[in-house]
Each structure stands twice: as structure tokens, then as C-alpha cells.
Image (cartoon, helix red, strand yellow):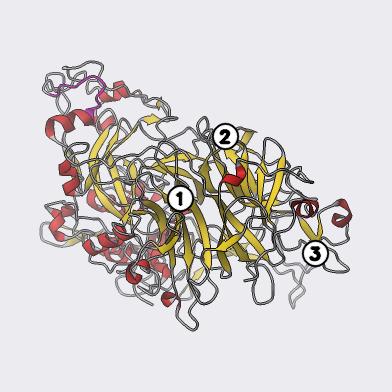
């Protein structure tokens, strides 16, 4: 690599007329604060393809490899300080370096580096990203994980030092998740992120010698850019993409993986510069770092593009959880603000005042920042030479951006000065910089000790506890009158809307090297992925829940009614529990609510205070169930009877009604044991629902048999008087094999679907609109009618000039359209017309058993997948 020249400050400043601030020229004195500390930076070749065009950077593809980088140390942050290439001689060939981070004492540097590509090797044989550590005092550079075998287990990026000397980093190794796959009798693999593009990066911690690697986050898409806050928590950028929500926001987590919480920006996806339509554009919070004043410093930039930079933005997450003062991006921008001296354009268009690729704050009480900055440049059309974005060059007939020229600068956003440290040469850029400066050590959060800080039995069992005060609390508002609903004298069990909590687990999807299966196995939408149901637990009369859940899994919850049908929308972000953790939350929220949810210091107070006094039962409840002040009903049961565990069935017993007030509500049970078709659980789980039990529903194996199950009504002599078998009527063939129009235009047969040859006809008929069929001359044909316009007038074919097209007889040719019947099933059981047919008094009342209806309901609610285990799906 060609090294950059160090030029006098006067020349550097004169070259930057498009700068982000008012650069100070002349003989500026060296700042005694700045020069005391060494700096490190990454110098790299601009990423270009074989034709010399810039390669697009995607910050959410952290495994991308851009060879041609080196890590450089300067003893002082001045242009004249000598340079040392720390990574020189490590590899033969072009390598890559990124993600610099410094220890609090300023003596150690940790970063990610990838070795050169191996010519003619397969992708899975190429080197991976590894974590490296440089100790300045010892002048030692080493890979943190010494073993080649262990180092190559995954892609490791974005390291940061924890206060106890360990390192937190983002990795595809998914160590704990891979281990748990063995319990499911699956091979070990790293799961793909939810868009199935590449393996998901999640958070891990390890000792500084590379030992004791522990996975601490269990997202199904990326967890990136971890940094340690002053209070000891880890702040990071989480990609929530369950169901295709595609949100990038900031979360926090403790170093042991407990207390995962939303922090900022879930509803603030479009805070970038306005486009030509005056609409703010999508922007990502890249490499967050806490400033001395408690604000979060980020580069705000488009997630993809060839500009490689964005704006300097400070987030006031102490006082705000979203960017705007009003929901849906309305109102004033209050949660974050640009600290750049001039306006920076972030949407990928020309930014006249340049762009920032990275930023690192000084911790010396000043407002200085070490930034990688490029002035705005365009090509002169006659010479194709780069020129600054002045009015002269922007007024050319055609404006073509020139390649960026990111150099290293000291930028003072309060004083309005910009001092060059390293100026870039054409074809190169300084992509990152950091300061080896001591700062206050963040607080140390010790890991809880089993048996002292947390329940040792829970740890041994590998479970945590989810404790919800009331599912009737929506963003701090009591939506039903909880006190009345909790009182058996006022509200019966049948009248309570929320009866059970369903807990669902994500199913990891392997890459094609592990298993190549047809993507039609996902069914109608890949966005919902595949899901397993871990079980159910009753919701107590006050809406409270307290239940043991397995640790170290991506979990989602749904509130369901007495029939097992989901109330409201799906949970849109993954929960997790570590062994022994007790996770408490106040209640629920709607998907579009911007009231802080899951962030304890900002969310509203609970709408349900619980028991109003101690040593007394809740009103009109069992006298023996004595509550303590503030307890919920679920907490009372846990204290008296022990922690609840999940069940596979919908099993209700009235534990609360005082029989002296009124009779107890009848017990109910909807069990998989009542199914006469194949059950979606291991047979051993029918009578003993343990931690290994899961409901895994595959449409062809568990739903289709319901339609084919014989349902004949016979008289005393055994003669069939009525045949309620679904496929007897709902099929294109009658009992004699003759063609027929299926009853209700619904084909529930196991014929091949016309929508997708890998599906059964019944699947697509239920979930997609389908043509109305008519029996015409011995054939089933789609019904067609002439199209009409908005005024009810018939529509005929016309040519490009709008003239009627005539047939051979000189008549206009009608435009024909196929008549379709609306699908019976929607996005959830409660929103599907299908179940209306089986309601009491309806045409098919009692045709299906409660257990069958519950199985269909839960299959629909979790996403109506065709398969819910990739290893059960047909291979390509």
C-alpha cells in the first residue's frame, strides 16, 4: 500500500474549501491537550470493482471483505508525528481492518481484522474476521483467540472492552444457540438472519485471552456495534426484523445477557436528510459511543451506498426514546441533533459540506472529536479532474460525484475549528480513527451468583421467569377495568377476554451448505419464518402472568382467548431470558404505539397496583390465597404454590373464586390427546409436558389430515345417514371420482396446488384468493366475466391510441376477467372467516372438534407456515 504524505497544515487547510467547518489556517499552535495522546487509524484503498466503480457499502453486512487496509499508529495527534503500521508483516497479501476500540486506560486497542483471501478456495474455506488486540505498553499485537480452529468458528467483529477486562463483540458463531440445537437432534449451525441473506451476528463476551466465549444475545437478525456505557451496560444497534418489520434501533443489555431492553429509536427510522419530495429519508445509528455529557455520539448515515459517510449526531437518550416530538415522525426533531458546523446530507446525494465516515470523542473536557471527513467533490467535465463542490462546479451541465477523499481531522464542534492530522491521497481513505486516551472506567456490573443473587434452582434448570403485571395494561392505561375483571363476583372466567399466554420460539434456518431445502416450505410468507410453540400458561383474572421459560432462546408471546386464538397482533421483537433471570414488565402495547415500552426508566407506571393491602385475599377470592400489598394474582400463586410451568394444552381450573360468594367456574381442557389425527408433539409429551416439549406444526402432516378424517354419522344399525368428512364435499372429485364443483368453491383435497406445485391444493385455497370454478362440458373452468369500469360500463380492448380493437366480425373485443372467491383465512385465527362457519348455530357447528379448531388456530396465529422445521421439509 502506498503511504499518505504528511503535508504542512497550511496546505491541507487550503485544499478543503468544502469543509464541514471553519478550518483554521496559518501557523496554528499545537494544542497541548491533543498532542499528549497517540492515535490509531485505518487507512485503506477505496473499495472498487474490476471496472473501477466504487463498491456499495452495506453496514448491515458486517462480514463483507474489502482488502487493502492497514492499521496505523501516530505517537501524537499532529500532522508531523511519525507513523507506524502496526499490522505490517502480519500477512502476505491484502487484508482488511475495522472496528477500532480503546480500553479505558488508553493502553490497549482492540479491533477486527481479516486475513487475505485464499485464491481458488470455496467461500466456507476463506478466512473469517477475527478479534485482535494491541497492547501499547508491551508493544504487542496478537490475535485474541489463539487457536486457529476456535478462531474460525465464526465471523467476529465490533469488539469493545468491558470494565473487568473481558471483550464484548458481535459474531456469527452463535455458540449457545448452536449447542442447544443438539437438544433438538439437529446438526450444529449458525442460523441465517431473518431475511435469509447471511448468518446473523449476535453479541458474545470472552476473556482477553480468548477463553470462556459466551453468547449473551439471541436475536434472529443482527446485533452490532456494542459499546459500554458509563453505568456498565452494553449499548448496541439491534436489527428487529421479525415479520419483516425491518427496524434498526438502539438497545441495552448487561454483560451477562440479562435485562435486554429497548433504548432509543425504534420508531425513528427516517431521521436522515429530506429528499426532493421533502420527506426525511432512512438513516442508521452507526457506531454509537457515549459522550462525557451522557449523550450518544453516532454517525447518522444511509444503510447502503458509495458515499461511506454521514452526519455527526448526538442523541439525547437520557430524556428521549424517539427522535420526534410527535408520533409517526411528526413534530420537532427533539431526541437527536446534528453537531456538525454546517448541514450534512445523508441520503446519498451530494453533500456540499462533506461527509463524516467515523468519529471518536476526546475525553479531556473539550468538544473535540477525531473524525474521518471528506470534502464534497465533483468531476470537471472537460478534464475529469476532481473539483470542490463550489457554485462554479455545481453549475456544470452534468454534475458527477468524484470519489470521496476521507482524511483524519480534529474537529471542534463548539469552537468551530477543523485541524487536519492525516490527509488522504486519491484512491485511498481513512475509514476510522481512535484516540489512545485514558478516560473514566465504566461501572463494573458483577455477574449474579446463583443461590445468592439469583435462584440457583432456576439456573440449574436452565430457565428464567417472565412476570407480567397485567395484559390489560396498555402503555400504562387500564383498558378493561382490571379491578372489576379480577373480581369473581363481577366477572366470570367466560367473560374475561384474555385467558392464556402462548409462548413461541424462533426456529433457526441453516444455510444451503448445511441443508438445501425448497423455500416453499415457509408457506405463504417467508417473513414469519418458522416457529415452535413452547406452551401455554393461564392468565390470572387480573391479567397477570408469572411463568418459567427456557433460557437462551429467542421468544415471543401472544395473548389468546379460551379457544387458543390470538387477541391482537403478533409480538414484533424477540425476548430472551438468561438462566435465573426474572424479567418483569407492566403489560402490553400496540405495534404502532410510541409510548416507551420495555425501558424501565421511561415507560409509564403500571396501571395495575395489585393487592391493596397485605395478609388479605383479593376481593371475593379464596380466603387461603392471602396477598401481600402490591402483589399480582400470579405473584401470589407463585409464592404460595411455586412457579408456574408451561403446558401444552389449554387447561383452566378456577383457583380464585370464593365458593361462599358463588360457584366456581367450570374447568375446561382442550388437549392434543383429543386429536384423532397425527399430533404435532412428541407422544411422550401428551402426558408429561417437560422442557423438551414443543408443538411443531407441518401443514401436510397435521392440518391436511383434519380435512381427510372420516366424519360419518350413522344410525343405530351402522348405516351412514350423513357424511361430514370435509373432502367429501370440498373436493373437485365426488365419491365416484367424477368432477364436481367443490362446495363453497373450497377445495380441501390433497391434490397439487395450482399456485405452487410444492403445496397441496387445500393450503392455497384457504390462504389465497382463488378462481370461481364452473363445470363446463365435463371440465372445471375458471368463471370469467366482462370487466366493467368504475361507472359500471363494460370495458373493451383498445389499441395504444385508445381506439377499439375489433374481432374478425367487426365487433369490439370484451376484456374478460376471472371471478375470484376471497380466501377464508387471514393473518390470524380471530380475523379469519373460516371459524365463523363452525360457530354455535352456524352451518358447520360441531363438525370439527375443539382440539382440531385449536390446532388450526395456533397454526394460523404463528404464521400459517407449510413446515415449521427446515429438516422436515423436502430437500432440493
- The reply, left or right, for residue 362 in relation to residue 770 is right
**Picture quarter with the C terminus:** bottom left
- Of the numbered discs 1 and 2, the one sitting upstream in the chain is 1
Q: Residues within 10 Å of mark 1 (few under 14, many from 20)?
A: some
Q: Secondary structure at mark 1?
A: loop
Q: Name the residue nearer the viewer: 725 or 665.
A: 665
Q: Name the residue nearer the viewer: 407 or 666.
A: 407
The verdict on residue 775 being magenta is no
Q: Are marks 1 and 2 in contact (CB under 8 Å)?
A: no
Q: Which mark is residue 802?
A: 3
**Picture quarter with the N terminus:** bottom right
Nearer the viewer's eye, disc 1 or disc 2?
1
Residue 785, picture quadrant: bottom right
**Residue 858 versus residue 735 in the image, above or below:** above
Nearer the viewer's eye, disc 3 or disc 1?
1
Looking at the image, which residue is at 60% across and 40% down? 33
Q: Which mark is residue 365?
A: 2
- The reply, left or right, for residue 677 in relation to residue 53 is left
Give percent across and percent down for residue 144.
38, 61
Rounded to the nearest angstrom, the CA distance separating label 3 from label 2 is 73 Å
Amino acid at each position: 500500500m502506498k503511504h499518505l504524505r504528511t503535508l504542512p497544515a497550511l496546505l491541507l487547510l487550503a485544499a478543503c474549501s468544502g469543509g464541514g467547518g471553519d478550518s483554521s489556517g496559518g501557523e496554528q499552535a499545537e494544542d497541548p491537550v491533543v498532542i499528549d495522546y497517540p492515535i490509531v487509524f485505518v487507512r485503506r484503498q477505496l473499495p472498487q470493482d474490476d471496472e473501477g466503480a466504487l463498491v456499495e457499502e452495506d453496514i448491515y453486512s458486517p462480514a463483507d471483505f474489502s482488502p487493502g487496509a492497514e492499521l496505523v499508529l501516530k505517537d501524537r495527534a499532529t500532522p508531523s508525528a511519525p507513523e507506524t503500521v502496526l499490522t505490517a508483516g502480519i500477512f502476505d497479501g491484502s487484508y482488511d481492518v475495522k472496528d477500532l476500540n480503546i480500553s479505558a486506560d488508553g493502553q490497549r486497542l482492540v479491533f477486527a481484522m481479516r486475513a487475505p483471501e485464499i485464491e481458488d478456495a470455496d467461500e466456507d474455506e476463506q478466512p473469517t474476521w477475527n478479534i485482535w488486540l494491541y497492547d501499547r505498553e508491551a508493544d504487542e499485537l496478537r490475535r485474541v483467540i489463539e487457536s486457529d480452529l476456535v478462531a474460525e468458528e465464526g465471523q467476529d467483529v465490533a469488539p469493545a472492552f468491558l470494565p473487568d477486562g473481558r471483550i464484548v463483540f458481535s459474531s456469527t458463531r452463535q455458540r449457545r444457540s448452536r449447542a442447544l440445537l443438539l437438544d433438538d437432534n439437529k446438526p450444529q449451525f449458525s442460523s441465517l438472519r431473518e431475511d435469509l441473506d447471511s448468518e446473523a451476528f449476535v453479541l458474545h463476551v470472552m476473556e482477553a485471552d480468548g477463553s470462556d466465549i459466551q453468547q449473551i444475545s439471541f436475536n434472529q437478525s443482527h446485533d452490532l456495534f456494542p459499546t459500554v456505557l458509563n453505568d456498565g451496560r452494553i449499548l448496541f444497534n439491534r436489527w428487529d426484523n421479525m415479520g419483516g418489520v425491518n427496524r434498526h434501533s438502539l438497545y441495552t443489555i448487561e454483560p451477562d445477557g440479562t435485562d435486554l431492553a429497548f433504548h432509543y429509536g425504534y420508531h425513528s427510522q427516517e431521521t436522515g436528510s429530506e429528499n426532493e419530495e421533502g420527506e426525511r429519508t432512512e438513516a442508521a445509528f452507526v457506531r454509537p459511543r457515549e459522550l462525557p455529557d451522557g449523550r450518544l455520539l453516532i454517525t447518522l448515515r444511509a444503510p447502503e451506498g458509495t458515499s461511506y459517510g454521514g452526519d455527526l449526531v448526538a442523541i439525547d437518550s437520557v430524556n428521549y426514546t424517539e427522535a420526534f416530538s410527535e408520533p409517526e415522525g411528526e413534530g420537532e426533531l427533539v431526541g437527536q441533533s446534528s453537531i456538525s458546523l454546517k448541514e450534512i446530507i445523508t441520503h446519498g446525494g451530494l453533500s456540499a459540506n462533506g461527509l463524516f465516515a467515523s468519529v471518536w470523542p476526546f475525553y479531556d473536557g473539550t468538544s473535540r472529536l477525531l473524525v474521518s471527513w471528506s470534502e464534497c467533490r465533483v468531476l470537471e467535465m472537460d478534464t475529469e479532474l476532481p473539483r470542490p463542490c463550489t457554485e462554479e462546479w455545481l453549475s456544470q451541465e452534468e454534475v458527477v460525484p468524484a470519489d470521496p477523499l476521507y482524511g483524519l481531522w480534529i474537529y471542534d464542534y463548539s469552537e468551530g475549528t477543523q485541524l487536519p492530522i492525516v490527509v488522504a491521497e486519491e484512491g485511498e481513505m481513512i475509514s476510522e480513527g481512535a484516540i489512545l486516551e485514558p478516560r473514566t472506567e465504566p461501572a463494573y456490573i458483577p455477574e449474579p451468583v446463583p443461590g445468592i443473587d439469583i435462584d440457583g434452582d432456576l439456573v440449574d434448570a436452565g430457565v428464567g421467569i417472565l412476570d407480567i403485571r397485567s395484559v390489560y395494561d396498555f402503555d400504562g392505561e387500564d383498558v378493561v377495568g382490571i379491578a372489576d375483571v379480577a373480581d369473581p363476583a363481577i366477572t366470570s372466567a367466560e367473560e374475561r377476554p384474555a385467558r392464556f399466554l402462548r409462548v413461541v420460539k424462533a426456529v433457526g434456518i441453516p444455510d444451503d451448505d448445511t441443508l438445501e431445502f425448497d423455500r416453499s416450505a415457509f408457506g405463504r410468507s417467508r417473513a414469519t419464518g418458522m416457529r415452535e410453540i413452547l406452551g401455554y400458561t393461564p392468565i390470572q383474572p387480573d391479567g397477570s402472568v408469572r411463568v418459567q421459560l427456557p433460557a437462551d432462546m429467542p421468544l415471543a408471546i401472544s395473548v389468546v382467548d379460551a379457544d387458543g386464538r390470538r387477541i391482537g397482533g403478533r409480538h414484533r421483537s424477540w425476548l430472551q431470558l438468561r438462566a435465573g433471570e426474572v424479567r418483569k414488565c407492566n403489560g402490553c402495547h400496540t405495534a404502532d404505539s410510541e409510548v416507551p415500552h420495555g425501558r424501565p426508566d421511561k415507560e409509564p407506571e403500571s396501571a395495575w397496583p395489585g393487592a391493596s393491602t397485605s395478609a388479605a385475599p383479593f376481593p371475593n377470592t379464596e380466603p387461603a390465597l392471602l396477598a401481600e400489598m402490591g402483589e399480582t394474582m400470579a405473584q401470589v400463586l407463585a409464592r404460595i404454590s411455586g412457579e408456574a410451568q408451561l403446558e401444552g394444552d389449554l387447561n383452566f381450573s378456577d383457583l380464585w373464586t370464593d365458593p361462599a360468594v358463588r360457584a366456581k367456574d367450570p374447568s375446561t381442557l382442550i388437549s392434543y390427546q383429543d386429536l384423532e389425527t397425527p399430533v404435532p408433539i412428541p407422544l411422550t409429551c401428551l402426558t408429561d409436558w417437560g422442557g423438551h416439549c414443543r408443538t411443531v406444526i407441518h401443514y401436510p402432516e397435521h392440518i391436511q389430515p383434519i380435512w381427510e378424517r372420516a366424519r360419518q354419522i350413522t344410525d343405530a344399525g351402522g348405516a351412514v345417514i350423513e357424511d361430514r368428512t370435509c373432502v367429501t364435499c370440498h373436493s373437485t372429485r365426488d365419491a365416484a371420482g367424477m368432477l364436481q364443483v367443490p362446495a363453497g368453491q373450497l377445495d380441501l383435497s390433497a391434490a397439487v396446488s395450482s399456485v405452487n406445485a410444492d403445496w397441496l391444493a387445500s393450503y392455497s385455497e384457504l390462504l389465497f384468493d382463488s378462481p370461481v370454478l364452473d363445470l363446463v362440458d365435463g371440465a372445471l373452468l375458471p368463471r370469467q366475466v366482462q370487466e366493467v369500469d368504475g361507472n359500471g360500463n363494460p370495458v373493451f380492448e383498445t389499441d395504444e391510441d385508445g381506439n377499439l380493437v375489433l374481432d374478425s366480425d367487426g365487433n369490439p373485443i370484451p376484456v374478460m376477467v376471472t371471478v375470484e372467491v376471497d380466501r377464508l383465512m387471514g393473518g390470524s385465527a380471530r380475523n379469519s372467516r373460516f371459524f365463523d362457519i363452525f360457530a354455535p348455530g352456524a352451518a358447520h357447528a360441531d363438525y370439527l372438534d375443539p382440539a382440531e379448531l385449536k390446532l388450526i388456530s395456533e397454526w394460523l396465529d404463528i404464521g400459517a407456515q407449510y413446515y415449521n422445521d427446515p429438516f422436515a421439509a423436502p430437500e432440493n
